[in-house]
């Protein structure tokens, strides 16, 4: 007899936001994007920057889903429906008009030239052809130069969304052609509220001090907080305590450190 096991997804993947309302700590970004989508005053290129694990790639996908959603609710036209073929394709990473490129592995000018050539064609299934370039600061100088003309005069149906953790490495000529958003670190209070919701859903018992410890260790990064929670639930058998977290991760009690 064969037994099929459902693939396990870590918390950082399974609890990734699928709508703007699920993004935490980025109210200014969400409000700006919602106003742009409502009024149709969309920039041709967006640049998202912050530390790791805040939600750059997630936000880029949300923008792509919202712009190409085929079945928006008339009462809230900014949120993707998550049920149409376009939204499902983007969630499954197989939408023909939404291309994600990792600049860390494709840094050359030839990769950008291929992207630019494809950008000149109209989208096949959706309203916009959207290119999401992650870790864009890894592109070579020649690759950046190849992008300049397209960013200056982009096709009307093409949008670019760049994500980076190293904003200082982006040439000023690129920055001046993009609408820039600096995502903020998420506060410990917001992180704690999110972890409490996940613990309740996953039946993880915990103390308040234990969650506070995870939030402090995450340093404002949502992904780090979820990864730590995912790890500690296994270490402690779904019973989070401060002592167990300290022993597992090997960090000192702050009160004792201050006393010393």
Image (cartoon, helix red, strand yellow):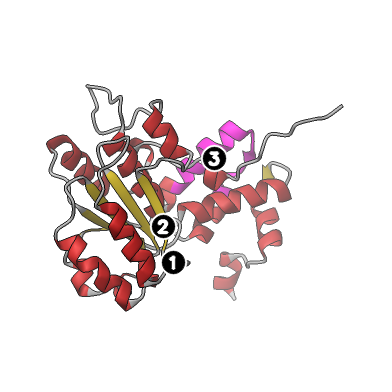
Q: Which one is nearer the viewer's eye here, 28 or 8?
A: 8
Picture residue at 40% right of the left edge, 64% below the top? 135
Residue on which the image places disc 2: 101
Between label 1 and label 3, give the one nearer the viewer: 1
Picture residue at 45% right of the left edge, 67% below the top? 104
**Mark found first going from the N terminus, 3 or 2:** 3
Name the side, left or right, on which 101 lies relative to 148: right
Residue on which the image places disc 3: 14
Give the residues drawn in magenta, as a range. Answer: 191-211
Picture residue at 28% right of the left edge, 59% below the top? 116
**In terms of secondary structure, where does tag 1 sit?**
loop
Label 2 with label 1: CB-CB less than 8 Å: yes
Indicate whether 225 appears above or below 135.
above
State the mark number for residue 106: 1
Q: Position of residue 211 (x, y in %)?
A: 55, 48
Q: Where is residue 205 in the image (x, y as percent from the top left)?
A: 65, 38
Between label 3 and label 2, give the one nearer the viewer: 2
Task: Determine the CA span between mark 1 and mark 3.
Answer: 27 Å
């Amino acid at each position: 007899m064969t037994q099929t096991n459902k693939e396990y997804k870590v918390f950082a993947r399974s609890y990734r936001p699928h709508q703007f309302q699920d993004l935490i700590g980025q109210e200014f970004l969400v409000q700006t994007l919602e106003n742009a989508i409502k009024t149709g005053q969309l920039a041709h290129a967006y640049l998202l920057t912050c530390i790791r694990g805040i939600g750059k790639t997630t936000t880029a996908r949300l923008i792509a889903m919202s712009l190409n959603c085929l079945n928006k609710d008339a009462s809230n036209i900014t949120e993707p429906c998550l049920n149409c073929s376009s939204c499902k394709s983007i969630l499954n990473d197989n939408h023909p008009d939404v291309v994600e490129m990792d600049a860390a592995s494709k840094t050359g000018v030839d990769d950008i030239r291929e992207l630019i050539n494809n950008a000149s064609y109209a989208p096949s299934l959706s309203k916009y052809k959207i290119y999401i370039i992650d870790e864009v600061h890894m592109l070579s100088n020649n690759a950046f130069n190849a992008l300049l003309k397209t960013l200056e005069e982009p096709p009307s149906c093409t949008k670019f969304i760049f994500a980076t953790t190293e904003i200082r490495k982006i040439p000023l000529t690129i920055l001046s052609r993009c609408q820039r958003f600096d995502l903020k670190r998420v506060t410990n209070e917001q992180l704690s509220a999110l972890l409490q919701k996940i613990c309740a859903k996953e039946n993880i018992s915990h103390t308040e001090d234990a969650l506070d410890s995870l939030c402090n260790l995450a340093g404002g990064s949502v992904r780090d907080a979820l990864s730590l929670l995912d790890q500690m639930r296994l270490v402690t058998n779904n019973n989070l305590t401060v002592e167990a977290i300290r022993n597992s991760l090997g960090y000192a009690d702050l009160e004792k450190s201050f006393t010393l």
